[in-house]
Image: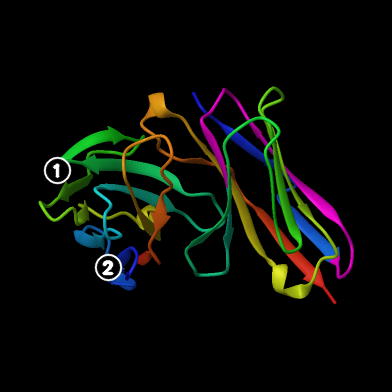
Amino acid sequence: ELKVEQNPLFLSMQEGKNYTIYCNYSTTSDRLYWYRQDPGKSLESLFVLLSNGAVKQEGRLMASLDTKARLSTLHITAAVHDLSATYFCAVDKREYGNKLVFGAGTILRVKS
Amino acid sequence: DAGVTQSPTHLIKTRGQQVTLRCSPKSGHDTVSWYQQALGQGPQFIFQYYEEEERQRGNFPDRFSGHQFPNYSSELNVNALLLGDSALYLCASSTPGVNTEAFFGQGTRLTVV
């Protein structure tokens, strides 16, 4: 069974600081996703990571994937208040019909 | 392109009632998946429709059923509503294949009272 664990579940940061969110998954997967969700809103796709060693960056966010360790990280650089949201990682696998399996999410609060 | 659209955006129902939620996929997409997101949790897969058939199902009771129409739009039906069915229901559309990504609608917030 494909399972996804994120940590921490809650993260309170000061503006300007760096931090990393971790995502572990239980079995090999085809793709790993990072989503952002603002309160009461839907999911906004941030990154799709396909292969071992993949690294993608957008603004202050950088995601990486280590398929051997079954680990992805979402690194936040010099946090700003606008990054406050809940971040989810999710994985899918073709033999499971490409359904997405999500982690519990990390609530990020950036304090000014 | 309107993307994935869901209706209604908010809904309040009484315990025991039935509800139907609707989803129109992104243009060019033929696969629709439904997810339930309870407050404070990650989305949980309900089921997926492709070619008007249910292709996969998550761990949800038979009270949850769906349908896909020839134009690829989809409905999610929930019978005998329970308080625990209160959640954000998300629809995602995609196309089959390895290099495809699911796009999510804005969701329907269902409150059961």
* Nearer to me, A66 or A24: A66
Considering every residue shown, the one lying at the far bottom of the view is A112
Question: Measured from the top left, where is residue B49 in percent x and y?
Answer: 23, 42
Magenta stretch, residue numbers = A14-33
Q: Is residue A44 left or right of residue B22?
A: right
Sequence-first tag of 2 and 1: 2
User: At 55% across and 31% down in the image, what residue appears?
Assistant: A3
Is B110 included in the stretch rendered in magenta?
no
- Element marked by disc 1: loop
Which residue was labeled with disc 2? B13
Question: Measured from the top left, where is residue B107 in percent x and y?
Answer: 38, 64
Q: Indicate the chain on which mark 1 is placed.
A: B
- Element marked by disc 2: strand
How busy is the neighbourhood of tag 1: few (under 14 within 10 Å), some, or many (20 plus)? Answer: some
Question: Measured from the top left, where is residue A10 in percent x and y?
Answer: 73, 55
Quadrant of the frame with the C terminus of chain B: bottom left
Q: Indicate the chain on which mark 2 is placed.
A: B
* Nearer to me, A85 or B82: A85
User: At 51% across and 58% down in the image, what residue appears?
Assistant: B39
Which residue was labeled with disc 1? B52
* Nearer to me, B72 or B37: B72
Three-letter amino acid code of the residue under disc 2: Lys
Q: Can see residue B26?
A: yes
Q: CA distance from mark 2 to mark 1?
A: 27 Å
Question: Which image quadrant is residue A87 in?
Answer: bottom right
Q: How is the image coloured?
A: rainbow
Three-letter amino acid code of the residue under disc 1: Glu
User: At 29% across and 33% down in the image, what residue appears?
Assistant: B56
Question: Which image quadrant is residue A39 in?
Answer: bottom right
Is A19 included in the stretch rendered in magenta?
yes
Q: Nearer the viewer, mark 2 or mark 1?
A: 1
Question: Which image quadrant is residue A27 in?
Answer: top right
